[in-house]
Image (cartoon, grey):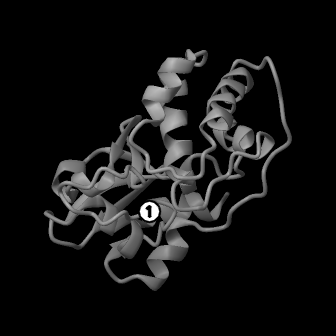
Amino acid sequence: MSRMTINGAPVEFELDPRTPLLYALREAANLTGTKSGGGQEDCECGVCLALVDGVALRSCRITLAEAEGREITTIEGLSRDRSHPMQQAMVAEQAIQSGYNTSALVIAGAALLERNPAPSEQEIIEALDGIYCRDGTYPRLVRTVQRAGRIMLRQESVSAAPASGIRAQDAAAAVPALSVPETSKASSDSD
């Protein structure tokens, strides 16, 4: 059994510890915002990014054993009401992609902004490099990260994006390979 915290809730996966984190997130936890680009060892698309202890990492390359005891944040957990500055800026700048890579771009931008809320254009390009993108919106993505930084620094504000609705408990109810400890259920039910 692999234990970790996903989107703020402790979870236990009853899966082979060699299972890539990506598949546990998507198939067992029903957190499908983290995309699969093939999941092969040589995969370079970057669409499977998740924050692992605050660092944007390819979840297809991390096993459940390697994720043991760590804090994992997916796009669904970045903010409950989609008010994270990257989410807000993506909507405001109309930089939403095909849905295939949008989550990874938001995760990469969020990780960068945690380290540096006022990154240079080159730092932004480097942070987003390697995330599969054929939509040609890189100039908008640079503006998006810059705007998200200003939002983080409270130099600018935008309206909240529409809220999402999935909770770990809802996913666990439908997926037998995932369990949410009782203490987590009680605190989440009071939200």
* Looking at the image, residue 64 lies above or below residue 107: below
| Residue 145: image location, x then y, percent | 63, 30
| Quadrant containing the N terminus in the rendered view | bottom left
Instruction: Sort mark 1 into few (<14), some (14-19) or many (20+) by Cα contacts within 10 Å.
Output: many
Q: Is residue 147 left or right of residue 167?
A: right
Q: Is residue 134 left or right of residue 24?
A: right
* Looking at the image, residue 30 lies above or below residue 43: below
Visible residue check, residue 71: yes
| Residue 83: image location, x then y, percent | 72, 43
Q: Residue at x 62, y 65 (%)?
A: 189
Q: Residue at x 52, y 61 (%)?
A: 100
Q: Residue at x 58, y 60 (%)?
A: 188
Q: Please give the residue where the numbered disc 1 appears in the rendered image.
A: 35
Quarter holding residue 155: top right
Residue placed most toward the observer, 3 or 100: 100
Residue placed most toward the observer, 165 or 134: 134
| Residue 18: image location, x then y, percent | 13, 63
| Count of numbered labels shown in the rendering | 1
| Residue 115: image location, x then y, percent | 47, 20
Visible residue check, residue 68: no
| Quadrant containing the C terminus in the rendered view | bottom right
Q: Residue at x 72, y 51 (%)?
A: 81
Q: Which secondary structure lies at badge 1?
A: loop
Quarter holding residue 39: bottom left
- Disc 1 marks which amino acid? Lys
Residue placed most toward the observer, 177 or 51: 51
